[in-house]
Amino acid sequence: MISFEKLASKWQKTKVLKKNFEIKDYLPETKWLNKKNLKSMLQKHQAVFVKPSRGTGGVGVIKVETGEDRDERIYTYHHIKKTKTFKTIGKLYFSLKKKIDKIQTKSKRGQGRYMIQQGVPLLKYENRSFDIRVIVQLNKKTKKWESAGMLARVAHPAKIVTNYSSSGTPMKYEQVMASFLSKEEIPVYKEQLENLVVKMANELSAQCNQLQILGFDIGYDENIKPWLIEVNLEPRFKSFKITDMETYEKIESNFTGYRGEEPVKAKPIKKRSKWKLKNVLEKQSEFRQHVPETQWFNHENLSDMLDRHQMVYVKPDNWSMGRGVFRVERVKNEDGSDRYMFQRETKVYSFDSFAELFASLDKQIKDMMKKRKTKNKKCLIQKGIHLLKYEGRIFDFRVLVQRTPDHKFEVTGMAGRVAQSQRVVTNIANHGQGYQVEPLLAQYMSDEQVQAFKIKLKELGEKIAPIYNLDAIGIDIGVDRDFFPWIIEVNIWPNLYGFDELEDKTMFNRIMEIRNYWKNR
């Protein structure tokens, strides 16, 4: 048997699947990256992809192509928006190694030894690359693998990867494939693809019995032959909400975690560091998809995250109450050029270049830290979530979970926090305002949907609390325009701002009852 951790390697998954002769024909040629292999692969294939063996989200993928310029052989690589051309394999390989070193220094999602994968000439939809994401789940009752959902992912015109996190567009399988197949052929090809990925799932699970859900990324070539691009052991499936809510809910209802039910950690967490609190949550695969991407603040990380997300938040690692938070954006001018902005409190600063933005932002952060005289001067960059709004103001939810006298974890408080107009944080201590949950969601959902969403938040809170094993935690949850909950922050010393100003004091009284019980023990 192979452990989950070992099978997470793309190389190991390829190695397992290649042993099955029925599957082998659908796998692109793959080799470890070195100068000799790069040369031989480019002699056989016009294009290859250089990618990390343990990367996720399309991070670190580099496309390398070979061609001719004035009868002279040239080599070109593409990474995000950058393109470089070389006349020799040696120079190409040297530049690739430097680029890989930079990627691995700044991104935890581009790790592992690098591989070279055969570039398959894929079909294009409206001149944009696309692949097919198929989610396969282990049926709880029958213990058999079943196809749970299928959609197409169409790449951003300027990107070489199709991932949703890299600005890819999820679309219905039938809509995209209608450009290549007749109405009668579409269900036939869909069923063939489902049978193929189920066969692959059986092969992988025979070697690792921890698997519960898998995501297969499949590309079609010009003959509409499927090719396996990648297998994800911990696939996100949020993009199904955009194309097919019914399928999303079916997947979620059968979702028990990437490795089934995992044991809860019981060691109390007492550090206020946002980075450490975030890491604790990310280690639990059930919650990982709810945590926005977070990196340490520096020049390279900020540039990279703005390229991929356009909007991020920069915040001190261990401050509270929304103090010191900056909203940073990259926007397009009418002429197509980039403009950079950041906002702190209600003041907005605008710049023509990223260099100007970073210099000003970095100076403000250093000045801010000097005034506070704090030992921990680190800041984080967090992927920006476009939150729902109430009367033009962003809002999120504070979910308070307490340990009851009988040592069970109970959500005793749930309230909305609406930011003051033009401000970037919702904290009550930073001019935010407390609200009941219902009126905030009423403009987006029916009464029944609001109650169902509250139950979802409650379940999320009561599952998370045992991980930290404290008498009380406050979880700040933001909801995006697809109604997906994001865990913005976990507070291990939660205040009661917002709950005390609600007209109905039932919730506040229950919170104080439990707080006083532990205080007086």
Image (cartoon, rainbow, N blue to C red):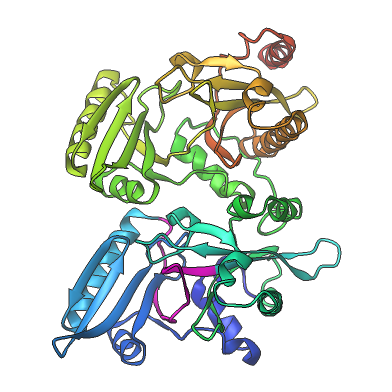
The correct choice, above or below, for 514 with respect to 451 in the image is above
- Residue 261 painted magenta: no
Q: Give the residues in magenta.
A: 108-131
Of residues 264 and 240, the one drawn nearer to the viewer in this rendering: 240
Left or right, residue 517 beside residue 20: right
Left or right, residue 414 beside residue 372: right
Q: Residue at x 75, y 28 (%)?
A: 447
Is residue 203 visible in the rendered image? The answer is no
The correct choice, above or below, for 182 with respect to 448 in the image is below
Of residues 312 and 14, the one drawn nearer to the viewer in this rendering: 312
Q: Residue at x 61, y 89 (%)?
A: 19
Q: In which quadrant of the rendered view does residue 410 lie?
A: top right
Residue 41 percent across, percent down from the top left? 35, 88
Left or right, residue 436 beside residue 421: right
Residue 475 percent across, percent down from the top left? 59, 30
Q: Residue at x 20, y 30 (%)?
A: 363
Residue 439 percent across, percent down from the top left? 66, 20
- Residue 110 painted magenta: yes
Of residues 222 and 93, the one drawn nearer to the viewer in this rendering: 222
The correct choice, above or below, for 168 with respect to 62 in the image is above
Residue 459 percent across, percent down from the top left? 72, 37
Image quadrant occupied by the C terminus: top right
Q: In which quadrant of the rendered view does residue 117 lie?
A: bottom left
Q: How many marks?
A: 0
Q: In which quadrant of the rendered view does residue 330 lie?
A: top left
Q: Residue at x 75, y 11 (%)?
A: 506
Image quadrant occupied by the N terminus: bottom right
Is residue 160 visible in the rendered image? The answer is yes
Of residues 299 and 186, the one drawn nearer to the viewer in this rendering: 186
Point out the residue furthest to the right here: 141
